[in-house]
Amino acid sequence: MATQDGGHRDAAVAAIAERSYERAGDEYTRAGWRVLADPRPDVAPFEPDEKGWAGVGLGHLAVAAVCYRVDATPARASRRAVEGIAIARDLSAGFEHPAQRACLSEFVADFRAIAGMDGVDAAYDDAESAYEAAADSIERPQTLGTTPLFEAAAAPIKQLARGLANGEIAVEWSDLHGDDPSRPGAFLAARAAYKRQRFRSLLERTVESGVLAAPRGTTEYGTDHHRCPSCGSTDVNWVADSTLCMRCSRPTEST
């Protein structure tokens, strides 16, 4: 995503590849703060923005909290989640579109889930209700779902899931959204319903495994130019500023 994160997301992905999750959490945190302070040259965080660029910063904070959970530092994850919840609620005052505000409610529920707080189900219920209430204001839910705000809210659960699926895409667009865009409220509310069912179990399985996958970027299967020294795979994931094994998210080497 074209936001001003000062290179900290690149550093976070590199730290994930080294399985240094505390450092990854710190770098994602710094990326989040940078984006929230100054998302893009033409976007101010507290002013209406049809793309919701500031949401990318929230997404970085959410992944930072996930990294701390995997690192077995839950207190830091909780602090990051509390911070994320406060920022999401604050940003809601400046976002004009009701569906964007519903997405910020979705973020609140995600942060509660990541930190293991009480009230997760109720928070996802609130997000679902907010999407339903926003239905009359939504003209093209598919387009809205591909804006930076909505993609940032989908990114953490996708990253968790791919690590448990041998690096493949395990949470599809059709999983997160309803099947009838002519009912835009229900179409987007499906995001919160799916997360309520899956987010916590994916997180707990990832924490138990002790391994978080890198986000998925541009991939290539069965290459003749790279081989992973850790697992032997020739499948490659180019993401951020790293060239990683698509399977185990460790650095891969050219052959």
Image (cartoon, rainbow, N blue to C red):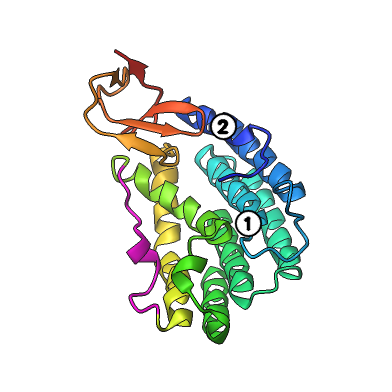
Q: Quadrant of residue 53?
A: bottom right
Across and down, in percent, residue 127 comes to 55, 74
Q: What residue do we see at 61% from left, 70% from top?
A: 100
Mark 2, residue position: 10
Q: Is 135 placed left or right of 224 in the picture?
A: right
Q: Which numbered circle lies on residue 127?
A: none
**150 left or right, relative to 237:** right
Q: Is residue 204 visible?
A: no
Q: Amino acid at mark 2?
A: Asp
Q: Residue 128, how many percent across, how many down?
A: 51, 77
Horizontal side of 162 relative to 133 (left or right) equals left
Q: Count neighbours of disc 1 (C-alpha within 10 A) and say few if under 14, some if 14 to 19, many if 20 or more.
A: many
Classify mark 1: helix, strand or loop.
helix
Q: Considering only vertical position in the picture, is 221 above or below 118?
A: above
Residue 227 sits inside the magenta stretch: no
Q: Marks 2 and 1, how far apart in space?
A: 18 Å
- The front one of 155 and 43 is 43
Q: Element under label 2?
A: helix
- Callout 1, which amino acid? Gly
Disc 1 designates what residue? 55
| Screen quadrant of the C terminus | top left
Callout 2 crowding tier (Cα within 10 Å): few <14, some 14–19, many ≥20: some
Q: Residue at x 70, y 73 (%)?
A: 96
Q: Nearer the viewer, residue 225 or 121?
A: 225
Residue interval drawn in magenta = 168-181
Q: Kindly identify the residue that appears in the image at 58 percent across and 29 percent down.
A: 11
Q: Is residue 24 above or below residue 141?
A: above
User: 185 or 1: which is nearer to us?
Assistant: 1
> Is tag 2's residue or tag 1's residue first in the polypeptide sequence?
2
Residue 29 visible here: yes
